[in-house]
Structure formats: structure tokens, C-alpha cells
Image (cartoon, helix red, strand yellow):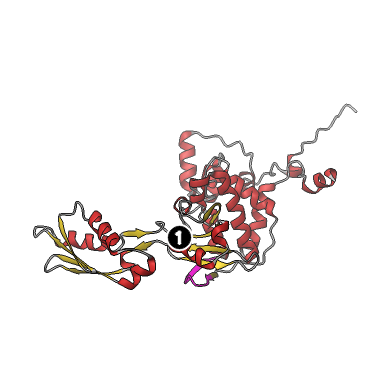
């Protein structure tokens, strides 16, 4: 059995594995669509296909549509009501979601009208809203008065109108409850297991782990950079493999996982996720010709000439450029003739 596995997985000496991996992903990539899929109940169009693949290999700081899949502990995963309670604790609530904020520049005032039905739905008290508003305006030279479900903010007469407008715009986005960065949180029943899970728009692994009812060992996000920051580069590398495989599978394209693993290893080998573009792997190549062949040709050649850089022509790209046999496969084998025999 061990011998059979070795025969199936073993790579021949001097095999151009990088070229094979690039071709194996590049050719199916030309057949990808520009589609996006819709998350039911969340009004979110999450990109898939080519746009998502480009996001992944470019190592974007944040994906276009970050999402999370959250598993719950045994106490909350078996009940829809309890799962929804956890979802409400996770979902971020800002002031403009529970109140109408209106400015009056003539009188240098801002009025906040709290909607009672909304604060009741999100489980927020009027006192909580008042406290958040007062804390936000602590150093803003303003007087805050409360009357039933209204908050009236009066600014100093000497304050400039443009400063009042800036405060008004920031006031609407005051965070009241939930995990920052999380938009909607929807509880749904997994048809395969029958347990309840939570989908969210937005991603904040550290914040979600603090919420009661969440299984902290089973939180998944499509934000590779956040996973790297929170859980480390190994977790980021595994997620990168899973995300690329998911993109390929969703398009009906069959690519051997080993090619994708090689790409993920190359992107994460230096201890952090790097893109494959000129600011990442391609720009870090030791060969002058390889860098020049990708982008910014004149700059690379000029700088290298000024510094007197020597190119040892050990890779694929640089040898193709000058019309020389690539030192891989049979091109790596050197034959000697013994003339004495």
C-alpha cells in the first residue's frame, strides 16, 4: 500500500511543478464566469468565479463581500429561538438603525428621535442610546437634553457649521450593540445535520468569539487576511486552499488540489500571505529578466544595470526570454562523451 501511494504521489526529478500548477489553474480560469451568488435573506451578492479568484491571488486586505459561517454550542444549536438570540447579539446595531437623526444648522442643533419599536426589537433601552450619544459628545462643546424618546443636541454658538455637519454625519454611525463590522446575522437550519448555524455579512472573528452561545472552535470566514491576523499564517494558508477549491468546484472545474496547495504554500512561505503580483511573488524574484518580463520592464532593467546585478538564468522565464533551454526536465540533464572508449 505504501509503495502504491509513493508511486501515485511521487514527483519526478526536475519536474516543472510551478509551470504545471500555473497552467492547471490558468487554463480553467479562462472559462470562469463573472457571476455572483445570492445569500437568501441577506440581500448580499457575494462574488464567485473569476472576480473571487482574483481577490484571493491578489491577497486583498478585505474581500469585496466578507462573510462568516458560525457554529453554535450544544445549548443553542438545537433551538431556532436560541439561535436567533445569538444572531441578535452578534448583529451590529448603529444609531441610524433605531433612530431618525436630523440636523438644524440655523439653530445649530441636532435632533435624535428614537424609534421605540426598533430599540425593542434589538433589545436596546433608551438609556443605553442616551449614554452612547453623551459619551460620543463628551469633548464636542455641546449640550445634550433628553425628553421622552428624543435627544436634543445644542452646539456652542461659536462652533463652525462645517464642524457641526461632520459631527452629525458621525453621530448616525455610533455603534450601540453587537459586534463591530458585522452587518446582518441570519440563523438557519443546516439541512444535512438539522442543527442551527449563523451566516453573517461582514467579518470579525475576535469579536464573535466573545459572544455567548458561539462555538469558538468552529468559526469560518472568507477573509484570509483577518484569519492570518487572528489565527496565524497556517490557518490562512488552509483557508486559501479551501476558498480556491470552492471557487473551482462551484464553476464545475476540476483542478488537482496539489496545484492549489503549491500556490498557497508559495504565497504563505515567508510567514505572511503575499500576492502573486508585482508587489508580491513576481516582484520578489531574484532574476532581473523574470521581474522585467512581468511588469515595469524598463524600471527593472535600468535599476539592475545601474547596480550591476548578475542574472544566473536559473529559472524558466529568463531562459525562455533569451531563447535558451530551460533547466528543467530533460533540459537539466547533461551528457558527457567518453572519447577514450
Residue 65 seen anywhere in this rendered image of the structure: no
Residue 203 seen anywhere in this rendered image of the structure: yes
User: What residue is shown at x 81% (from left), y 47% (from top)?
Assistant: 5
Which residue is most to the left? 157
Nearer-the-camera pick, 139 or 21: 139
Q: Principal SS element in the magenta part?
A: strand
Residue 41: in magenta span = yes
Quarter of the figure with the C terminus: top right
Percent of width and height locating residue 54: 54, 59
User: What residue is shown at x 48% (from left), y 49% (from top)?
Assistant: 296
Which residue is most to the top? 340
Percent of width and height locating residue 6: 80, 44
Q: Which residue is mark 1?
A: 202
Nearer-the-camera pick, 10 or 282: 10
User: What residue is shown at x 20% (from left), y 63% (from top)?
Assistant: 165
User: In the structure shown, which secondary structural element does the residue marked by tag 1 occupy?
Assistant: loop
| Magenta span of residues | 38-47
Percent of width and height locating residue 273: 53, 46
User: What residue is shown at x 61% (from left), y 53% (from top)?
Assistant: 241
Crowd tier of the residue under label 1, counting other residues whose Cα lies within 10 Å: few below 14, some 14–19, many 20 or above: many
Q: Is residue 3 left or right of residue 331?
A: right
Residue 326: in magenta span = no
Number of marks present in the image shown: 1
Nearer-the-camera pick, 10 or 204: 204
Which residue is most to the front? 75
Percent of width and height locating residue 15: 73, 45
Q: Is residue 245 left or right of residue 15?
A: left
Q: Quadrant of residue 11?
A: top right
Amino acid at each position: 500500500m505504501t509503495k502504491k501511494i509513493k508511486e501515485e504521489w511521487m514527483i519526478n526529478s526536475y519536474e516543472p511543478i510551478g509551470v504545471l500548477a500555473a497552467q492547471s489553474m490558468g487554463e480553467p480560469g479562462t472559462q470562469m464566469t463573472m457571476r455572483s451568488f445570492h445569500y437568501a435573506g441577506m440581500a448580499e451578492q457575494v462574488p464567485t468565479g473569476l472576480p473571487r479568484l482574483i481577490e484571493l491571488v491578489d491577497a486583498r486586505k478585505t474581500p469585496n463581500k466578507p462573510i462568516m459561517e458560525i457554529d453554535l454550542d450544544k445549548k443553542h444549536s438545537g433551538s431556532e429561538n436560541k439561535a436567533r438570540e445569538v444572531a441578535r447579539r452578534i448583529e451590529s446595531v448603529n444609531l441610524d438603525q433605531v433612530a431618525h437623526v436630523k440636523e438644524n444648522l440655523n439653530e445649530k442643533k441636532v435632533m435624535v428621535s428614537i424609534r421605540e419599536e426598533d430599540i425593542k426589537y434589538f433589545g436596546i433601552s433608551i438609556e443605553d442610546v442616551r449614554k452612547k450619544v453623551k459619551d460620543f459628545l463628551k469633548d464636542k462643546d455641546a449640550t445634550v437634553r433628553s425628553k421622552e424618546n428624543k435627544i436634543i443636541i445644542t452646539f456652542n454658538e461659536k462652533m463652525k457649521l462645517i464642524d457641526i455637519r461632520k459631527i452629525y454625519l458621525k453621530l448616525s454611525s455610533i455603534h450601540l450593540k453587537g459586534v463591530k463590522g458585522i452587518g446582518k446575522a441570519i440563523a438557519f437550519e443546516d439541512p444535512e445535520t438539522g442543527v442551527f448555524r449563523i451566516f453573517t455579512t461582514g467579518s470579525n472573528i475576535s469579536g464573535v468569539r466573545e459572544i455567548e452561545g458561539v462555538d469558538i472552535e468552529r468559526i469560518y470566514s472568507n477573509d484570509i487576511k483577518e484569519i492570518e491576523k487572528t489565527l496565524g499564517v497556517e490557518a490562512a494558508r488552509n483557508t486559501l486552499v479551501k476558498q480556491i477549491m470552492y471557487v473551482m468546484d462551484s464553476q464545475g472545474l476540476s483542478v488537482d488540489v496539489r496545484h492549489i496547495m503549491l500556490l498557497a504554500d508559495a504565497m504563505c512561505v515567508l510567514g505572511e500571505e503575499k500576492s502573486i503580483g508585482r508587489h508580491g511573488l513576481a516582484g520578489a524574484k531574484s532574476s532581473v529578466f523574470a521581474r522585467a518580463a512581468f511588469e515595469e520592464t524598463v524600471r527593472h532593467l535600468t535599476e539592475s544595470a545601474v547596480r550591476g546585478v548578475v542574472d544566473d538564468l536559473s529559472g524558466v522565464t529568463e531562459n525562455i526570454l533569451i531563447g535558451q533551454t530551460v533547466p528543467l526536465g530533460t533540459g537539466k540533464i547533461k551528457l558527457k562523451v567518453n572519447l577514450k572508449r
